Image (cartoon, rainbow, N blue to C red):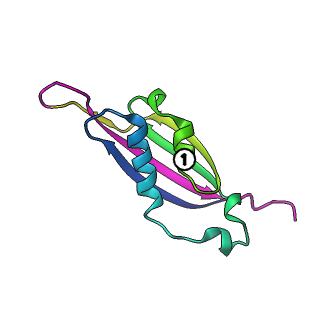
Amino acid sequence: MRLLTEFGMGTSLRRGDYTEAAARAVRDALWHNSINLAELFGFDKADMIIDVQIGVQQPEAVDVAAIAALFPYGQPQVRVVFGGLDIPRPEGEGNATVIANVALSVSFDMERAA
């Protein structure tokens, strides 16, 4: 059962680094909450199922393992899809500014064995 959804946005302003933009979006979403859902329902934090959906213009350029490693606990399931924005540099030189969007949904297996 999904109990919480948080949203975040992150950028890579000059390097065109999709993983860094995605990581910043994840941190943005994580740092906006301090909800103790696990304890509220009698679960351990390790039991949290974290659905991570990231939108960027080049999904294949995101290091999914690096994103999953950002979570201090829980079971992150990272999915990268086409989305976000690439904004070309005005001079036409160098890498575009990359904008990543993320939605984090936290749930628990409420039917767990006793």
- Residue at the right extreme of this rendering: 114
In the figure, is residue 26 to the left or right of 44?
A: left
Q: Relative to 114, does residue 63 appear above or below in the rendering?
A: above
The quarter of the displayed image where residue 91 is located: top left
Residue at image x 80%, y 60%? 111
The residue to which callout 1 is attached is 52
The quadrant in which the C terminus is found is: bottom right
Residue at image x 66%, y 58%? 48
Q: Relative to 70, does residue 5 appear above or below in the rendering?
A: below
Q: Residues within 10 Å of mark 1 (few under 14, many from 20)?
A: many
The quadrant in which the N terminus is found is: bottom right
* Residue 43 inside the magenta-drawn segment: no
Residue at image x 50%, y 34%? 63
The quarter of the displayed image where residue 89 is located: top left
In the figure, is residue 8 to the left or right of 2?
A: left
Horizontal and vertical percent position of residue 79: 55, 38
Q: Relative to 15, does residue 67 appear above or below in the rendering?
A: below
* Region rendered in magenta: 90-114
Residue at image x 36%, y 34%? 17
Instruction: Pick whichever, 104 or 13, lies toward us.
Output: 13
- Residue at the bottom extreme of this rendering: 40
Horizontal and vertical percent position of residue 43: 72, 67
Q: Amino acid at mark 1?
A: Val
The quarter of the displayed image where residue 109 is located: bottom right
Instruction: Pick whichever, 60 or 81, lies toward us.
Output: 60
